[in-house]
Image: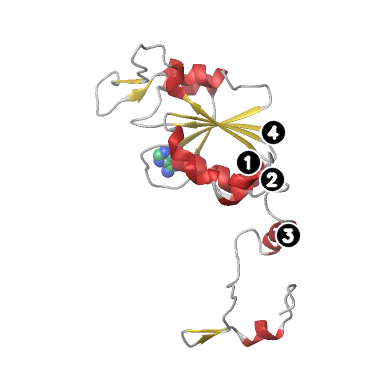
Amino acid sequence: MRIDILTLFPEGFEPIKQSIIGRASQNKIIDINLINMREFSKDKHKKVDDTPYGGGAGMVIRPDVVYDSYKSVYKENSKTIYLTPQGKTLNQKKVQELSKEQHLILICGHYEGIDQRVIDEIAPEEISIGDYVLTGGELPAMVLVDAVSRYIDGVLNKASIEEESFTNNLLEYPQYTRPEKFLGREVPEILKSRKSSKNR
Ligand code: ADE
């Protein structure tokens, strides 16, 4: 899967360059590209936002900047998502559905949001990661990338995915490892008597 992330803050994406998702990118299992929308500004000072028509606090991202960056990555098989608190709340079913796509384009808003005309033109699916407001779509985009990547073949080991579908995708049971006794608390007897695959 290819994922193109349109953002004004590409330097904020360090967390998904680490650990499991980082390794999957290095191994070319997922291809994550950060597109800095500022590079699509036609302004000599690389300005990307302006004051809202009708007044109000904050700044709004210009439609041409978003549209040109979108056009630079769009293909016929692209699925485009705009991360916004007004969107439909992400859940595991949607995550699984998105993991079957070949190409995701994630649009991250910032400031007071993005000019509505480019949202109407592109008509992306609008997704929220919960009923609270963040300062931008960058953290939500990383949450989505992390959750979706887990379902892509080769990112996790097969046993983890199988165990997860067994537990209805969400409900993990409590886990224990060594030492057998920690601050007076014991590993449950039933687990100690069961041989693990690692042959304790
Ligand atoms: N941008 C700001 N807050 C958000 C949220 N809760 N979900 C998705 N995008 C957002």
| Contact flag, marks 4 and 2 (Cβ < 8 Å) | no
**Could you tell which of marks 4 and 1 lies nearer the N-terminus?**
1
Q: Position of residue 85 (x, y in %)?
A: 42, 40
**Label placed on residue 200:** none
Task: State how far apart marks 4 and 2 are (Cα).
Answer: 11 Å
| Contact flag, marks 2 and 3 (Cβ < 8 Å) | no
Residue 88 as seen in the image, left or right of residue 158: left
Tell me the mark number nearer the camera, choosing from 1 and 3: 1
**Label placed on residue 162:** 3
**Label placed on residue 25:** 1
Residue 149 picture quarter: top right
Label 4 is placed on what type of residue? Gln
| Contact flag, marks 3 and 4 (Cβ < 8 Å) | no
Task: State how far apart marks 4 and 1 are (Cα).
Answer: 15 Å
Please name the residue that numbered disc 2 is placed on. 152
| Contact flag, marks 1 and 2 (Cβ < 8 Å) | no
Task: Tell me if I can see residue 114 in this picture.
Answer: yes
Q: Say above or below: 74 vs 101.
A: above
Is the distance from the Cβ of mark 2 to the nearest ligand 1 atom less than 8 Å? Answer: no
Element type at mark 4: loop
Please name the residue that numbered disc 4 is placed on. 102
Protein image colouring:
secondary structure
